[in-house]
């Protein structure tokens, strides 16, 4: 029996800066998960992954991450993705200093 498709977002790391970035519905990359396209269809997810992989001069490590619809946009369902979106945990800097998590 096939499993039900879990909604996803396309994510990667910025090639030069290393920041976690997300693919939007209008083919942009953003550092804000709430702006990412939440994909609820498996075939569409495969197409969006191919679209995102065309930006090899901008991104590295493109993949689909599980997400759910939240009040302000997609939210991670796994602690790894929650950790990735807030940045390193050794001290508050960058996104951690700016975010009110």
Image (cartoon, rainbow, N blue to C red):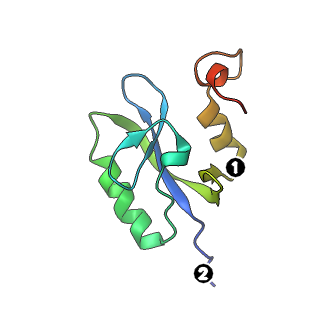
Q: Earlier in the sequence, mark 1 or mark 2?
A: 2
Q: CA distance from mark 1 to mark 2?
A: 21 Å
Q: Which residue is mark 1?
A: 78
Residue 9 position (above or below residue 95): below
Q: Secondary structure at mark 2?
A: loop
Callout 1 crowding tier (Cα within 10 Å): few <14, some 14–19, many ≥20: few
Where does the image place residue 58, in percent across and percent down from the top left? 31, 34
Residue 91 position (above or below residue 66): above
Q: Which residue is mark 2?
A: 2
Q: What is the count of numbered marks?
A: 2
Horizontal side of 42 relative to 28 (left or right) equals: right
Q: Nearer the viewer, residue 69 or 12?
A: 69
Where does the image place residue 60, in percent across and percent down from the top left? 39, 36
Image point (42%, 22%), residue name: 17
Q: Secondary structure at mark 1?
A: loop
Image point (61%, 35%), residue name: 84
Where does the image place residue 63, in percent across and percent down from the top left? 47, 49
Residue 72 position (above or below residue 56): below
Image point (63%, 85%), residue name: 1
């Amino acid at each position: 029996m096939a499993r039900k498709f879990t909604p996803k977002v396309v994510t990667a790391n910025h090639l030069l800066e290393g920041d976690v970035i997300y693919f939007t519905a209008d083919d942009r990359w953003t550092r804000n998960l709430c702006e990412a396209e939440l994909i609820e269809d498996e075939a569409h997810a495969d197409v969006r992954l191919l679209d995102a992989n065309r930006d090899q001069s901008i991104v590295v490590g493109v993949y689909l991450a599980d997400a759910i619809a939240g009040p302000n946009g997609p939210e991670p369902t796994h602690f790894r993705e929650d950790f990735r979106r807030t940045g390193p945990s050794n001290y508050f800097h960058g996104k951690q200093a700016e975010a009110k998590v």
